[in-house]
Image: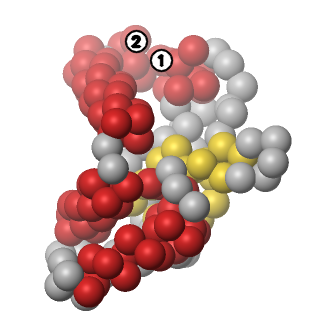
Amino acid sequence: LKAGKVKTFKTNADGKELITGLFTAGEFFGYLALLDESDHTDSAVALEDSELVYIPKDEFRQLVSANPAVSEGFIRLLANRVSEREGQLLGMAYNSLRRRVADALLRLHAQQRAQNPDAPIQLSRDDLASVVGTATESLIRTLSEFRHDGLID
């Protein structure tokens, strides 16, 4: 992603959306299907004006096979992604809703800070609920509690 913000998501049979990734400038997405030679299973939507860079499969494979530094970089990227996903899954399984919302806000804040330190998190309630893995109403109630407790503005 050269510029902007993109979300990737999966939709279940009931039409419920689960956000699988939020990406900002400088981040890569869509490479898993390329690496394991499968079809893309996620959809992607630009959350703001965005500029994408498309790397054709053959060029990507050639770059990775010819350049050990690029290969190592992608291995680190994959390892970090797996570690993040494991943490998210454990959190969704065992943490309270308050903890999951707080963790999601902290992750989004850290990601936003890298792009613009003073900007607020700009994500719809529905999208934030999807990131947390809860109903929008439960998210809104938790955010209201956080606001009442003086934890967020």
Q: Which residue: 25% across, 66% down?
A: 109
Crowding around mark 1 (Cα neighbors within 10 Å: few <14, some 14 to 19, many 20+) is few
Q: How far across and how far down the image is residue 143, in percent?
A: 37, 76
State the SS at label 1.
helix
According to the image, label 2 marks what residue? 65
**Which amino acid is tagged 1?**
Gln
According to the image, label 1 marks what residue? 62
Q: Quick check: 22 left or right of 66?
A: right
Q: How far across and how far down the image is residue 147, in percent?
A: 28, 84
Q: Quick check: 115 left or right of 143?
A: left
Quarter containing the C terminus: bottom left
Q: Is residue 14 visible?
A: yes
Q: Quick check: 32 left or right of 100?
A: right
Q: Which residue: 31% across, 43% down?
A: 95
Whether the residues at callouts 2 and 1 have beta carbons within 8 Å, the answer is yes
Q: CA distance from mark 2 to mark 1?
A: 5 Å
Crowding around mark 2 (Cα neighbors within 10 Å: few <14, some 14 to 19, many 20+) is few
Figure check: 31 above or below 61: below
Report which quarter residue 33 is drawn in.
Answer: top right
Figure check: 132 above or below 29: below
Task: Give the total of numbered labels.
Answer: 2
Between residues 34 and 127, which one lies in front from this camera angle? 127
State the SS at label 2.
helix
Which colour style is shown? secondary structure
Q: How far across and how far down the image is residue 43, in percent?
A: 68, 47
Q: How far across and how far down the image is residue 102, in percent?
A: 27, 61
**Which amino acid is tagged 2?**
Ser
Quarter containing the N terminus: bottom left
Q: Which mark is residue 14?
A: none
Between residues 128 and 31, which one lies in front from this camera angle? 128
Figure check: 134 above or below 57: below
Q: Is residue 107 visible?
A: no
